[in-house]
Amino acid sequence: MENANKAFNEERYDVSFAMFNALAKEGYTDAIYLVGRHYKEGYGVEADHEKAISIWKRASKRGSLDAQYALLEITQTTTQCCKG
């Protein structure tokens, strides 16, 4: 995670996206949330809000408070954010 965070902070989004995506596939909840953030903002990948929502729902089910907050923020409803 440290190298992925460093790449993100250095605005090397293509690198951070690839690293977070690999970690997400291994099941790291924080990485899943951050992949969603990349999709939401278009960091290193084409922006796709629907994909971000889908990814954040997965992270939310795994207990990510960041994902839950992001879902609330993007959907503006607790019904949308908190159901699979």
Image (cartoon, grey):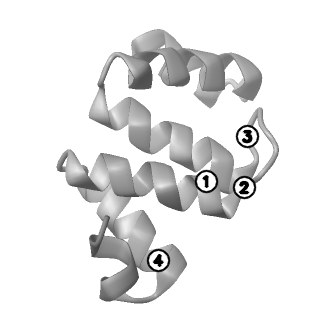
Q: Residue at coordinates 76% horizontally, 47% vertically from top-left?
A: 42
Q: CA distance from mark 3 to mark 2?
A: 10 Å
Query: Tag 1, which secondary structure?
Result: helix
Amino acid type at circle 2 is Asp
Residue 2 picture quarter: top left
Q: Residues within 10 Å of mark 4 (few under 14, many from 20)?
A: few
Looking at marks 3 and 1 on the same chain, the residue that comes earlier in the sequence is marked by 3
Spatial CA distance of label 3 from label 1 is: 13 Å
For label 1, count other residues whose C-alpha is less than 10 Å away and answer few (under 14), some (14-19) or many (20+).
some
Residue 46, percent from left and from top: 82, 44
Element class at badge 3: loop
Judging depth in this view, the residue of 69 and 26 nearest the camera is 26
Q: Nearer the viewer, residue 37 or 53?
A: 53
**Pointers 4 and 3 in contact (C-beta within 8 Å):** no
In the rendered structure, are the residues bearing label 2 and label 4 in contact, judged by CB atoms less than 8 Å apart?
no
Using the rendered view, name the quadrant where residue 1 is placed: top left
Spot occupied by residue 29 in the image (x, y as percentages of width and height): 29, 35
The quarter of the rendered structure image containing the C terminus is: bottom left
Are circles 2 and 1 on residues that touch, CB within 8 Å? yes
User: Marks 2/4: CA distance?
Assistant: 16 Å
**Rounded to the nearest whole Å, what is the CA distance between mark 4 and mark 3?**
18 Å
**C-alpha gap between disc 4 and disc 1:** 15 Å
Residue on which the image places disc 3? 43
What residue is disc 4 on?
73
Q: Give the number of the disc on residue 51.
A: 1
Q: Earlier in the sequence, mark 4 or mark 3?
A: 3
- The amino acid type of the residue labelled 4 equals Glu
Q: Nearer the viewer, residue 34 or 57?
A: 57
Q: What residue sits right under mark 2 in the picture?
A: 48
- Secondary element type, mark 2: loop
The tag earlier along the polypeptide, 4 or 1, is 1
